[in-house]
Image (tube, grey):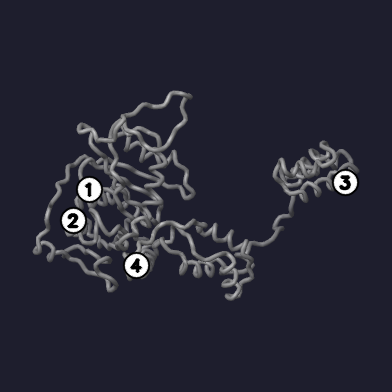
Amino acid sequence: MNEFQKRIYLASEAEILGYGGVSKSARKLRVSRVTISSGIKELNSLDRETSEQLQISLQKERVRNEGGGRKRVEETQPGVKEALESIISESSFGDPQSLLKWTTKSLRNLEQEMNRKGFNLKYRKIGYLLKELGYSLQLNQKMNQVGQEHPDRDEQFKHISSKANSFLEQNFPVISIDCKKKENIGNFKYNGAEYAPKGTPTKVLDHDFPLPELGKAAPYGIYDIGLNEGFVNVGVSSDTAQFAVNSIRSWWYEMGEERYPEARQILITADGGGSNGSRNRLWKYELQQFADETKLAISVCHFPPGTSKWNKIEHRLFSQITKNWRGRLLVSLQVIIDLIAGTTTTTTTATGLKVVATADEKQYLTGIKVSDEEFKSLNIVGDEFYPDWNYTISPKL
């Protein structure tokens, strides 16, 4: 039904109920009493029309004149979204790439700042615009580490944001990487629940010790920030630097090379520790091999200590995978691959996440050392700002 038909229907229901029908209909159908009252006036006027006129009124496809209605604020106040986002970008934190956006400013404070910039906006309209821009209201989270916060933490976030935006503007890939928590393969209990006939729960093992014959799965993820696509390389060995770089290599040949045929550089955002840590020599050595192989310059930006939860892959990829296999039994490597790949079709996200998953059954050795001579041979250049966290490895000539 169009708007007019809905008002006539609501008015008819209210009239049938008699005294108090407007209030009862409004509460039951969750509509405004004003809407129902307007419908009653229109219904009374229709009673005086001929039968033919009544049918025409009820069957009209268009209620409002074409081009009618209030103009969007973007038309009446050009540049309003850009101005709002420029204010927000200084107050949003925990999101270096500004794709999972949240802000510390209230709507009323934003209203004051926008008015100072010459825009005429009320706080409610600012709320709608923020939603369109991808921002959301968030609760406080335990994120700060007392006595351990790095003095360059905020500056590093700004550096990552600036560099990521520069790469995206040039249509160069920006990827967020990390290894998801290892999962035991087998008939183990996993968090979550699925519908089943009452009284028939799935029976699982009463312990969480890994089964030697099945081992564990290590899902290493690569999340393409610009395209909202994920790639997960599921290994059965140790989470080493070789495994991490080989996962990136697999993503490049499986997805990245086709999507970025003109790319000359890749930007990687990663945690500060683990197999892809800022102090891991083997990580940088393996990236050099990858750069030489693909002739790509590999830029890396590490998150400051204690901020790994802000890595985009955690919120955009791993969280969706966890939802997709909740309550499922990860009885084999193939089942894990299928569930991860099934995130594309069985998990609905606002931005249409797509995921590809592959198996990596290679055994990676631990304890590999990179000598001083090998490390000095790397073609690595640090950024001006904090070169330990930000650097570029270029192909050797």
**Horizontally, is 130 left or right of 209 in the view?**
right
Q: Secondary structure at mark 1?
A: loop
Amino acid bearing label 1: Asp
Amino acid bearing label 4: Arg
Q: Secondary structure at mark 3?
A: helix
- For the N terminus, the quadrant is top right
Amino acid bearing label 3: Ser
Instruction: Pick the residue in front: 98 or 81.
Output: 98
Measure the C-alpha gap from mark 3 to mark 1: 75 Å
Residue 45, label in figure: 3
Instruction: Pick the residue in front: 113 or 300.
Output: 113
Measure the C-alpha gap from mark 4 to mark 3: 67 Å
Give the image location of residue 49, x and y in percent. 89, 43
Residue position marked by numbered label 4 in the rendering: 153
Residue 286, label in figure: 2
Using a 10 Å C-alpha cutoff, classify the residue at mark 1 as few (fewer than 14 neighbours), some (14 to 19) or many (20 or more). Answer: many
- Mark 4 or 3, which is nearer the eye? 4
